[in-house]
Amino acid sequence: MKSLLSLTLLNIKSIIKKSKDFHNYIDIIIMNKFLAVCFVLLISSISLFGVTEGRIPSSREMNNTRTEIRRLYNKGEYNSVVTLCKKIVNTYPDDRFAPLYLAYSYERLGQYSSAESIYLRCLKSDAYGDEDVQRIRTNLSNVYTNLYYRYANRRQINQAFNVVKSAEYYLPDNDKFYMYDAELNIMLDNYTEAIQQIKKSWEIDARSVEEKLDSSVYKLHRMGDCYRKLGKPSYNEWKKYITPIYKKNPDNDAITLILADIYFLNDEERSKRNNMRNKVMQRYLNKSGERSSVAVQLPVKGRWYVSSGAFQSQLDTHNGYDGYCVDLVRINGDGKSRIGAGTTNAECLTFGQDIYAAADGVVERMCIGGQDNAPGCMDSATLNFITLRHESNGRVYYTKYLHLKQFSSKLRVGQRVKAGDIIGQCGNSGYSTGSHLHFGIYDENNVSLPVTFLVGEQEIAPKFKMTINAE
């Protein structure tokens, strides 16, 4: 740079000495100014941030540059940060500051692939300390998470798999990507592979089992969903995995209920599983204190029989958290629930009967596409149900209507209903061998509440083998 300046001044002096003409002198002055402007532009073009090519930038210049980058980043001017950082990276490839802010800005701009590339280069460079490496790994995890959801939400399964496999390779200790892997396999009905990925996610999590059961028990529930899809031959494998966890944590409600469900699905340990459920319920009641019953309209019309009541010892769906639920069956004047042999659903008086909203509410959840069972048969995968959310005097509760007839409701999630509105029809789906309505009221923790039915001027507490006439 110094030699360039000296050469420029010598050229100007030489021209002045040789020029005698006034006009030439004026031309020289103009040329001198022109050269000076060019010199400034040259300096500006070579200087990226107060540091000129060919010399080591001073600490002050570098600090000023970093301050400016932080200022732009904090203002959300990410494109400006990208432009400046790219110049620095290209000129000073060993700089450790600019690549990070370049990647941060790409991430903020949603350019996740570009951010991923830079984060990976940073991890491979060995130029960063432990604190920076941890921050890079955290941000790389965020990048992979955003890419996963971008592709998964669009059902671009192959792209989502590529992202997850990259995450598993570069972040092998991050348990959440194995769960993402499992979810993708579930989408493809690859339940066996999904189970293996869920197990890996559970086992890689370095926290204690107690901590995992408190915050990540959903993984074990998701595993259970996969075993259910695989069917009864796989339940022993499921039980083999869950039992050791239960034995080390017998007072944990979540794992207790999972094992009780396995016993139920595997048709074993009937007394044991119901005792387990009731212990969990009792622990809940001890903590929550007295819970008053909820009075609602009877969800059916006509003459009905309470075929199953609260806390019947051998009925799994009327124990534990479901203890206050009741089963209702339509009967005629002779007390019969069917006509003929009752070998078809059409011969059951309950089948096809209208179901009414027990109170004003909003549709919280529903499933109505499962096929109805034939009488005497049961298929856990076909359960049709509707859950309504209610709020009264500041109290939130939910009513659940189970075993509905296939396609018998046109409601939508989020739709408001009034007490007495028809919401569906009785069917024979799910854990049901004969058409009936399984009804329950639940608190905000999905634990059943005592119920009373408003029938005319009466308030009836349903009991096993009771007849309720609501003509």
Image (spheres, rainbow, N blue to C red):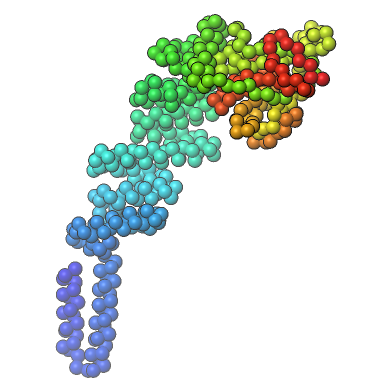
Q: Residue at x 25, y 54 (%)?
A: 92
Q: Quadrant of the C terminus?
A: top right
Using the image as rendered, state which of residue 76 and residue 191 is in the foreground. 76
Q: Quadrant of residue 465?
A: top right
Query: Does residue 4 lie above or below 219 as drawn?
Result: below
Q: Quadrant of residue 61?
A: bottom left
Residue 464 in percent (x, y) is at 68, 10
Q: Quadrant of the N terminus?
A: bottom left
Residue 45 in percent (x, y) is at 29, 66
On the question of residue 189 being in view, the answer is yes
Q: Residue at x 19, y 93 (%)?
A: 20
Using the image as rendered, state which of residue 49 and residue 116 is in the foreground. 49
Query: Which residue is at the far right?
Result: 333
| 84 relative position to 254: left or right | left
| 214 relative position to 362: left or right | left
Residue 436 in percent (x, y) is at 71, 16
Q: Residue at x 52, y 26 (%)?
A: 186
- Total numbered labels: 0
Using the image as rendered, state which of residue 378 and residue 252 is in the foreground. 252
Using the image as rendered, state which of residue 147 and residue 156 is in the foreground. 147
On the question of residue 90 being in view, the answer is no
Q: Residue at x 41, y 15 (%)?
A: 249
Query: Does residue 9 lie above or below 343 as drawn?
Result: below
Q: Quadrant of residue 215?
A: top left
Residue 11 in percent (x, y) is at 18, 80
Query: Does residue 388 lie above or below 260 as drawn?
Result: below
| 424 relative position to 332: left or right | left
